[in-house]
Amino acid sequence: MIKHRIIEKPAFDVVGKKTWISGQDNELFGQFWVRCQEEKLFERFEKLSHHQPGQQTGSSVLGISCVEKDPANRAFYYMIAIENPDAHWQEQELYQVPASRGAIFERIGKIPEAIVKSEIYAFTEWLPSSAYDHAKTPEMEVYFPGNDGMREDSYCEFWLPITEKSSVDV
């Protein structure tokens, strides 16, 4: 079983690079991560953040699925980002993650397998049996400092935005 907890987060700004994900093809995510690595995006993130984790997430890097218009539509913009320590950085795109309630699913393991398992569990097991629906805010993959993703003990979290089910849905 994957551990989870419920949290409330205020809105916060991120800066990064985005791409269009045209559907359920998980390969598109991996290709985008490789392209960003080749373009030295992560080195620029480290310089910009001064190697400090994000204030709201504690992360070193975020994967943000911008599904706020329709969470059921799995074609959306996907962004690799960091919490924005400097709103004047013009090289990348700015985005505001809205305030939200979220279910956070913790996972230890190699990336991307660990994050995918967290997402599958969240959507296929936890959400259908919970008292919540998917909120119309972005989903986030949260990656932490000191985790390279290649080790079996890498730690990551999947943040699923939630809202209480209406009494009609229950």
Image (cartoon, rainbow, N blue to C red):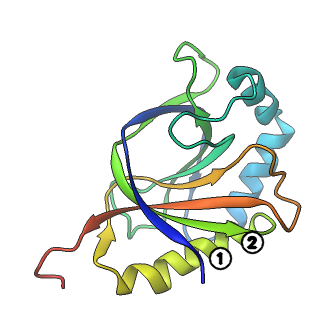
Q: Is residue 26 visible?
A: no
Q: Quadrant of residue 42?
A: top right
- Which residue was labeled with disc 1? 117
Residue type (three-letter) at the residue carrying disc 1: Lys
Q: Position of residue 3 (x, y in %)?
A: 56, 73
Residue occupying the point 75% across, 65% down = 112
* 35 or 126: nearer the viewer: 126
Residue occupying the point 54% across, 33% down = 55
Residue type (three-letter) at the residue carrying disc 2: Glu
Q: Position of residue 31 (x, y in %)?
A: 76, 56
Residue occupying the point 50% across, 75% down = 122
Residue 40 located left or right of residue 137: right
What's the mark number on residue 43?
A: none
Do the numbered discs 1 and 2 sit on residues whose CB atoms are within 8 Å? yes
Q: Residue furthest top?
A: 88
Q: Quadrant of residue 10?
A: top left
Dot 1: what SS? helix
Residue occupying the point 60% across, 42% down = 58
Q: Position of residue 74 (x, y in %)?
A: 48, 67
- Which residue was labeled with disc 2? 113
Dot 2: what SS? helix
Q: Residue furthest left?
A: 168
Residue 74 located left or right of residue 52: left
* 40 or 52: nearer the viewer: 52
| 46 shown above or below 146 | above
Q: Quadrant of residue 39?
A: top right
In which quadrant of the rendered image does the N terminus lie? bottom right
